[in-house]
Amino acid sequence: MSLNRRHFMHLAGVGAGLSLAGCAGAPEEASVPVASLFAKPLGFQLYTLRYMLAEGVGDIFERAAAAGYTEIEAVQSTNVNGTVVAWDDLAPAVKAAGLTPASSHVSAPVILGVGEIAAGPKTLEESAEWGVKNGFSWLVMPYVPNDQRGDNRDHYLRLAEKLNHAGEVYKAAGMGFAYHNHAFEFGPVGDSTPMDTLLEATDPELVKIELDVFWTSIAGHDPAEWIRTHPGRAKLLHLKDKAATAPTQFAEGVAAENFKEVGSGVIDFQAVLKAAAEDSVERYVVEQDQTPGDAVDSLAMSAKYLRTVEV
C-alpha cells in the first residue's frame, strides 16, 4: 500500500513527537543501553544426531536449519551399533538444507597412526585434501581412545608431537587445527595433567583447543575461567549443559541424564559466552552426547536459549 506525501509527513511528525515526548518524560530510560544478545553463527556437531541418522536422513537437516542453525561440524565417520554414519554420505543432504560445513572431527587414528577407521581418509595428507574439498575451515582431533592414553608425562609429550605435526600439515593446506578435550586431560598424571602438558608442548600457532564446556566442568573447572586464563587457545567451543547432580570426575562414564540442553543445567553460559567473545573464539558448536528424546528437538532447545543470553 502506498502513502501520499501528506500522510507520510503526518506519520513522521507523530513519530517525532512521540519520540521527543518519551525523551522529555523519561530521560533515564533513554540512557539505558540495549542488551546485546548472543548473535554469532551457530553450528551443531553431527555426532548429536548419530542415532537418528543411522535410521535414515529424512528431513533431519532441514529441521536443524529451521531451529536456527546455520553451520555444522562434521564427523568423519562413526559406528552406530554396526551402522557406519559417514560424512561423505551425508554431505549432499547437509548442503541441500543450506547448512555450512565449517569444521570437522577427523578420526583419531588419522592423527595417532593407530586404530581402525570406519570410512573416509586414512592419512594426514588424505585428510587435508578431504578437508579442503569439503570447505572446512577447521579440522579437529576429537578423542584419545582409552587404550591410547598414558600414565606419564612422556606419553603426552609424544602425543603433542603428533598434534604439532598434524597442525603443520593442515596449516599448509589452509586450515586450522584444534584438539577437543574430554575430562581425562584434567586428571593428575605424575605432577602435572595431560592438558597442561599438551598446552606446554604444542605450538599455539599450530594447535588450538576446541573447549568442551561440559567436560571441562565435569572435571571440576570453570570453562569461562579456563578461557580467560588461556588467551588465544580456545578457538572453537562445544556447548552443552550438565545437571546439578552430575559428579565431578575425570572419566567419560557419565550417566545419560547428566547431559542437558544448553540453559537447562548449571553451567553459567553468560559467563562462558562473554569470555569467548572477549577472546575472539571463532566457532560455536552445540553438541549433546545423549538426549532424552528426539535429538533435533534438543538442539532446538539449546539454540532458542542461546539467543536469549546477554553477552
Image (cartoon, grey):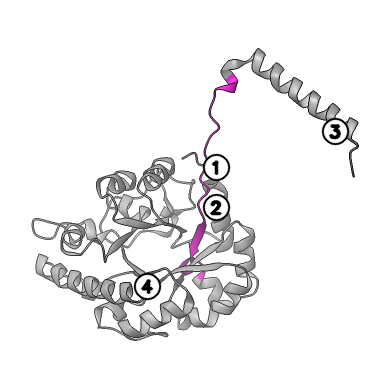
Element marked by disc 2: helix
**Is 141 above or below relative to 69?**
below
Residue 69's disc is none
Q: Is residue 228 magenta?
A: no
Quadrant (top left/top right/bottom left/bottom right) for the N terminus: top right
Circles 2, 3 touching at the beta carbon (< 8 Å): no
- For marks 4 and 2 on the same chain, the one whose residue lies earlier in the sequence: 4
State the residue at coordinates (59%, 16%): 27
- For marks 1 and 2 on the same chain, the one whose residue lies earlier in the sequence: 2
- Residue of label 1: 308
How far apart are the two marked residues, 2 and 3, measured between alpha carbons?
40 Å
Quarter-of-image position of residue 172: bottom left
How far apart are the two marked residues, 1 and 2, measured between alpha carbons?
9 Å
Q: Position of residue 29 (x, y in %)?
A: 59, 20
Element marked by disc 4: loop
Query: Which portion, as a residue range, is magenta?
Result: 29-49
**Is 13 above or below relative to 254?**
above
- Residue of label 3: 8
Q: Say whether residue 17 is left or right of residue 133.
A: right
Evaluate whether residue 79 shows in this view: no
Q: Amino acid at mark 2?
A: Ala
- For marks 4 and 3 on the same chain, the one whose residue lies earlier in the sequence: 3
How far apart are the two marked residues, 4 and 1, measured between alpha carbons?
34 Å
